[in-house]
Amino acid sequence: MLDLSIVIVNYRSWAKIESCLQSLVQQTDLAQEIIVVDNYSNDGILEKFIEKFPFITWIKNNKNDGFAAACNIGARKASTKWLLFLNPDTNLPKDCLPTLIPFCDLHSEYHLISIKQLDEKGNNTHPYGIFPNALNSLGLIRSLNRLFLFPDQTKRAISKNSVSYPQWISGSFVLIRAKHFNLLNGWDEKFWIYFEDVDLSKRAFEKGLKRVLLNDWQCIHSHGVSSRQNKTIKILTKSEVVKSNHKYIDKHFVGNTRIIAHIWLRLHKSLELILMGIIDPSKKKIFKTLMPFWYQLFSKQVKP
């Protein structure tokens, strides 16, 4: 049995999490613990899964405090050397963990570890990125940053090597030793959803911990199942992407750089949402959702 605890956060992703759990119990060597934290799905289905998978540790939250908080709750229940934070919409080949864990045991220089992730059509989803700076919240500028400032961080460069070192790795699959997770004080619960993985990687960078992508291992990841269930949830989560970006800026940027980053993010997101709102009503609703947040944020920024 692997010295590994797998922590999964679920919110009404029942079809996907069932497939995920089946893939975990079919591993040729099993994890010592599988812990599922249900973030207040509140739809009457959880009890059926508890009956179907009685060997799994189920934690039922009485409210949804977000992904980071739920991950921390699950991690506190773990008692193993390794922790794997895994999204419920992932599916692992049966030889994935039994070969991955022994390999990582041999490499003490690997700290935050992820693997190649494919969508259901077999396309590489590139679960990594470069750290935000004052201007690269816009995708085009981010691509130019990669190309000219960080050529080792382009998708092509990261994908071609067996072992690559992205600046940050996606929270959909994060393998980490418990001692390093504790060193980082876990996930930052100020991030309800999105950017908590970028923040974790940034803090790891500051502690001298390497973020590693192992391309010789892979899993299937059906991205965004929990966050795209209906229009209301989609509007909520798309708004949270922008809010979490601002929270990251507030936490990691200082001085004029922080102010510039906040202004630039608000400017280009406002233009994007206003223009796209002409043809997509959901964009208008996202913009309206963000307006009170932006008002409070910028009121705070201009205080003496």
Image: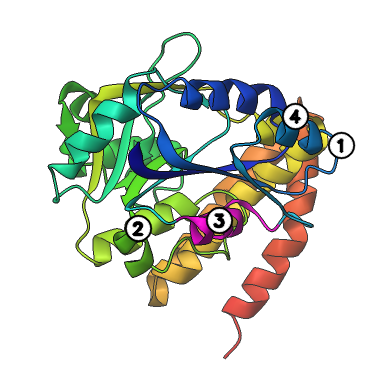
Residue 84 in the image: above or below residue 275: below
**Disc 3 packing (10 Å; few <14; some 14–19; many ≥20):** many
Mark 1 touches mark 2? (CB < 8 Å): no
Which label belongs to residue 44?
1
Mark 3 against mark 2, which lies toward the viewer? 2
Which amino acid, mark 1?
Gly
Tell me which amino acid carries mark 2: Ala
Which of the two labelled residues, at mark 1 and mark 2, occupies the earlier sequence position?
A: 1
| Residue 71 on the magenta span | yes
Give, as a single range, the part of the protein colored magenta. Answer: 65-78
Q: Is residue 287 above or below residue 277?
A: below
Asked if residue 192 lies left or right of residue 142, the reply is: right
Q: Tag 2's secondary structure?
A: helix
Question: Camera-side residue: 303 or 36?
Answer: 36
Quadrant of the drawing holding the N terminus = top left
- Binning the other alpha carbons within 10 Å of mark 2 as few (below 14), some (14 to 19) or many (20 upward) gives many
**Which residue has dot 4 on it?**
229
Residue at horizontal 19 percent and vertical 44 percent from the top:
149
Q: Total number of numbered labels?
A: 4
Residue type, mark 4 in image: Gln
The outermost residue toward the top is 121
Quadrant in which the C terminus appears: bottom right
Q: Which residue is mark 2?
A: 178
Task: Find numbered disc 4 in the image and state the secondary structure of the residue it sits on.
Answer: loop
- The amino acid type of the residue labelled 3 equals Ala
Question: Label 1 vs label 3: CA separation?
Answer: 24 Å
Taking the image as shown, residue 254 lies to the left or right of residue 270, namely left
Closer to the observer: label 1 or label 3? 1
Q: Which residue is mark 3?
A: 68
Residue 142 image position (x, y, % from top left): 36, 41
